[in-house]
């Protein structure tokens, strides 16, 4: 099919005086039906034959019907002409073309739903201009109107303001919402105000960008000048502090001089300047190695931290186990405790006193943890066993075995 820009040229009857006016009709393609229908309605109206499309004429020999058919046939592809060529009236041809492009009522409804979903999702991108985004909204509104759904102008205006990038347009949007009645404001008026604001912001941004470039150029020039001055003032020294500055008008760099007779006064060796001295480079490497070693030692020291724990034994109440029976070596099996704990350090076969912290019991008492270790014992069958991860709590008057931890 021909592209959207293809035009069909029609020549109506010559006007008085012998001049001929030309009307350009758009060529219908697979994707431009909505725009084509709008343009063709205007073209048929110019020739005063649109009424035969709205109301079908009784006979195909009507002059207006023939003119309308001629205009329509010149603006559709040949393949479509062959399909609708048997129809005798312009209204039937128009309806056939509309049916082929608009589809049945269900297809029309589906297209409308898709279009309205696109309308709701549409948001203006940071890289877009007001003209570009406004054009997208207007295009969707036109397509919806062609499908029988009119988007009211207040809805279009509110959608426009809501979809703008907040950071860039928040001030102008707030001003418009406070000053204007959005139910009575036109879409074109809103676009005009936003375009004016956009131009003002663009001018400000360009001025700030120019100022930034100027400041950067000045800073860079000062930096280069400072570097040049420092380089010019650099002096190499051999034995006796002799300067390597040239005696003529220009200054020769010491990198270009013959170093075979140069003697560095610190090492008493020939053939190099201070910055190339092997002894000096060796000292620098040794210093870097020592600093790196010290840094690693500091990191290791930072990692050597005591373990601090906080236990919340809300289901364990030690006072329930505290009796005055006078018996020793009594351990209570508690299904409410989540950890083994004792207040007698003599039980421990090994203990880590770096583990510290606090434990809170169900009676809201809080006492300190002073270590964690293991307890070795012999069971009733004479077998040696070890109970691990037992907390040492000096203020605890009971010995508690956690049933959950034991299992």
Image: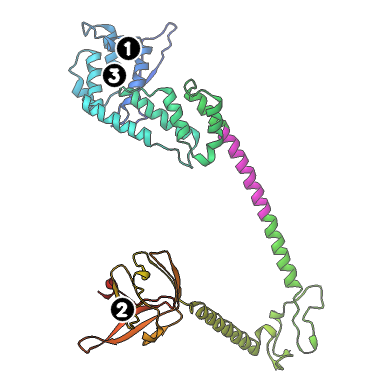
- Magenta-colored span: 197-216
Residue 137 visible at all: yes
116 or 238, nearer to the observer? 116
346 or 60, nearer to the observer? 346
Q: Is the residue marked by circle 1 packed among few (<14), some (14-19), or many (20+) residues within 10 Å?
A: many
Task: Tell me if 307 is positioned left or right of 209 in this view.
Answer: left
Query: Which residue is pictured at 40% across the width and 36% down the height?
Result: 122
Query: Which residue is pictured at 69% across the width and 90% down the height?
Result: 260
**Residue 312's image quarter?**
bottom left
159 or 132, nearer to the observer? 159
Image quadrant occupied by the N terminus: top left
Residue topped by disc 1: 50
Residue topped by disc 2: 331
Q: What separation in Å lies between label 1 and label 2 (alpha carbons)?
A: 105 Å
Query: Which residue is pictured at 25% across the width and 25% down the height?
Result: 102
Q: Position of residue 72 (x, y in %)?
A: 29, 19
Residue topped by disc 3: 72
Depth check, mark 2 against mark 3: the one in front is: 2
Vertical side of 184 occupied by 205: above or below: below
Question: Magenta segment: does it hold 167?
Answer: no
Of callouts 2 and 3, the N-terminal one: 3
Of callouts 1 and 3, the N-terminal one: 1
């Amino acid at each position: 099919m021909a592209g959207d820009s293809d035009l069909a040229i029609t020549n109506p009857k010559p006007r008085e005086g012998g001049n001929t006016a030309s009307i350009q009709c758009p060529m219908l393609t697979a994707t431009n039906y909505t725009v084509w229908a709008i343009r063709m309605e205007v073209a048929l109206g110019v020739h005063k034959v649109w009424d035969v499309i709205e109301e079908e004429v009784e006979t195909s020999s009507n002059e207006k019907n023939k003119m309308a058919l001629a205009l329509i046939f010149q603006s559709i592809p040949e393949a479509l002409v062959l399909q609708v060529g048997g129809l005798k009236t312009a209204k039937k041809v128009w309806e056939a073309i509309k049916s082929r492009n608009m589809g049945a009522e269900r297809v029309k409804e589906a297209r409308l739903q898709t279009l309205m979903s696109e309308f709701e999702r549409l948001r203006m991108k940071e890289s877009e201009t007001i003209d570009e985004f406004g054009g997208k909204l207007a295009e969707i509104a036109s397509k919806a109107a062609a499908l029988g759904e009119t988007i009211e102008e207040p809805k279009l205006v509110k959608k426009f303001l809501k979809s703008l990038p907040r950071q860039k347009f928040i001030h102008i949007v707030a001003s418009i919402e406070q000053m204007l009645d959005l139910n009575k404001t036109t879409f074109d008026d809103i676009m005009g105000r936003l375009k004016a604001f956009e131009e003002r912001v663009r001018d400000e941004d360009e001025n700030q960008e120019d100022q930034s470039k100027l400041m950067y150029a000045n800073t860079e020039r000062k930096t280069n000048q400072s570097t040049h001055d420092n380089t010019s003032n650099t002096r190499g020294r051999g034995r006796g502090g002799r300067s390597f500055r040239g005696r003529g008008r220009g200054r020769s760099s010491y990198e270009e001089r013959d170093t075979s007779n140069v003697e560095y006064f610190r090492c008493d060796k020939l053939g190099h300047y201070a910055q190339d001295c092997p002894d000096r480079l060796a000292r620098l490497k040794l210093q870097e190695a020592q600093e790196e070693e010290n840094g690693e030692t500091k990191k290791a020291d930072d990692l050597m931290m005591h373990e601090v724990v906080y236990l919340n034994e809300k289901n364990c109440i030690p006072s329930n186990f505290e009796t005055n029976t006078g018996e020793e070596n009594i351990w209570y099996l508690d299904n409410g405790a989540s950890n083994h704990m004792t207040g007698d350090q003599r039980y421990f076969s090994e203990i880590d006193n770096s583990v510290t912290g606090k434990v809170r019991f169900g009676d809201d008492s809080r006492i300190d943890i002073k270590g964690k270790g293991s307890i070795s014992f012999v069971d009733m069958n004479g077998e040696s066993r070890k109970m691990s991860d037992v907390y040492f709590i000096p203020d605890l008057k009971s010995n508690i075995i956690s049933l959950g931890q034991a299992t």
